[in-house]
Amino acid sequence: MSENETLNILTLAAAMHFTPDTAVQLYRAAGSATAVMDNRRNLRDIMPDCPQKAIDTLADTGEARRRAECEMEANARCGVQTLCLGDGDYPQRLKDCPDAPLVLFFKGTARLNRSRVINIVGTRRCTAYGQDCVRSFTKRLAELCPDALIVSGLAYGIDICAHREALACGLDTVAVLAHGLDYLYPPRHKDTAQLMLEQGGLLTEHFTRTNADKLNFLRRNRIVAGVADATVVAESAGHGGALVTARIATSYGRDVFAFPGRVGDERSEGCNNLIRDNKAALITSADDLVKAMGWQDDAKMEQARRQGIERTLFPELTDAEQAVAALLEKDNDQQINTLTAHTGLPVGELTALMFSLEMKGVVRLMAGGVYHLIRS
């Protein structure tokens, strides 16, 4: 994406930070932020039902432009990635959601578009039972799907437990924040967040100097739900943010799982209700989730590695298919445009080739148009 388009996206996001969903609708309708900026005097030509508030807001974008320029400079200085909705590195699962953020800011090492992404959420006032559920689940998941990414919100209770257990098990873990990357809330979790920068990362939709307001925490839940294949509610009372995340995940067509608790236990009421109302599948371990999600291939591959079994390099493939398989063997989970750049093959020819590899059981097409090598 060009620097000018990135600047225009940041300008659009800064100008319409109170109505971000309208900004995204305009962007999708126009096809680019540059097109929105170029036509901001006649926005209803782009989106006939464009609200008058948006028209008034975009009539003068001078201050928003200055804010965008400052943000670009700060991000470059601090090693923060700007992930715009049209970027290949933008979380593709989230991109498919109708209320996806126009722009995200990410600092860390994790690949956000890998083939297995799970969020673990729950009450801030968790019990030893909830912590044990997260601990055993994460440890087993690391054995079954060693490339899985764990997402949560860095809050007290289940969130921070999920991050710390992921770190301990060698899994990458990403926190979705309700504020800018220039400070951290809660401050007590700073040490864990620092470790996550080397084994995961921090993700937010907010510019620097954005406070952790209540509304930001509510909107943060949609990102937690949207970036993942599945939501796991480890422990929750009858009301709370974890249940909001579960509801949003369901609206996105994502799978929701919950650990059952003792009948009458206040902090398991939410999980038990989700299961009772068929809004979440009951799980007691990572094995249950892996089976329900159809992720057994990862588990079998890891078992083969531990037993020292060498996998073949697909003797039944054509030379071109061998080349693509070798690329994915080296760096798994790539989109078609990335593979096109690496192979030099035309998109049409490569698409047919990838379909052939799917039919041969060599690759699987995942969410966001990401190809995952099964027989690596």
Image: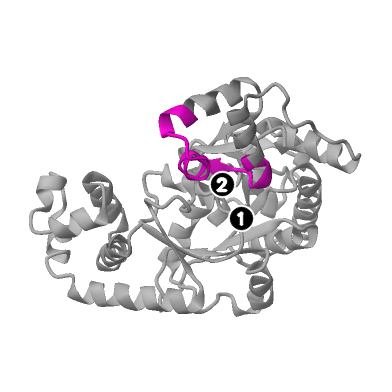
Instruction: Evaluate whether residue 211 shows in this view.
Output: no
* Residue under pointer 1: 151
Percent coordinates x, y for residue 157 in the rendering? 67, 64
Of the pair 285 and 4, the residue shown nearer to us? 4
Q: Are marks 2 and 1 in contact (CB under 8 Å)?
A: yes
Rate crowding at label 2 as few (under 14), some (14 to 19) or many (20 or more) other CA atoms within 10 Å.
many
Q: Secondary structure at mark 1?
A: strand
Percent coordinates x, y for residue 358 in the rendering? 59, 25
Q: Residue at x 74, y 43 (%)?
A: 145
Instruction: Evaluate whether residue 114 shows in this view.
Output: yes
Sequence-earlier tag: 2 or 1 = 1
As drawn, the residue found furthest toward the right would be 307
Rate crowding at label 1 as few (under 14), some (14 to 19) or many (20 or more) other CA atoms within 10 Å.
many
Of the pair 334 and 84, the residue shown nearer to us? 334
* Residue under pointer 2: 228
Q: Quadrant of the C terminus?
A: top right
Q: Would residue 328 be counted in the magenta stretch?
A: yes
Percent coordinates x, y for residue 160 in the rendering? 67, 65
Of the pair 288 and 266, the residue shown nearer to us? 288
Task: Judge whether 67 appears above or below 130 on screen.
Answer: below
Q: Is residue 72 left or right of residue 288?
A: left
The amino acid on which the numbered mark 1 sits, given as a three-letter code, is Val
**Main SS of residues in magenta:** helix
Q: Is residue 184 left or right of residue 316?
A: left
Percent coordinates x, y for residue 35 in the rendering? 19, 53
Q: Secondary structure at mark 2?
A: loop
Q: Would residue 311 be counted in the magenta stretch?
A: no
The magenta segment is 327-350
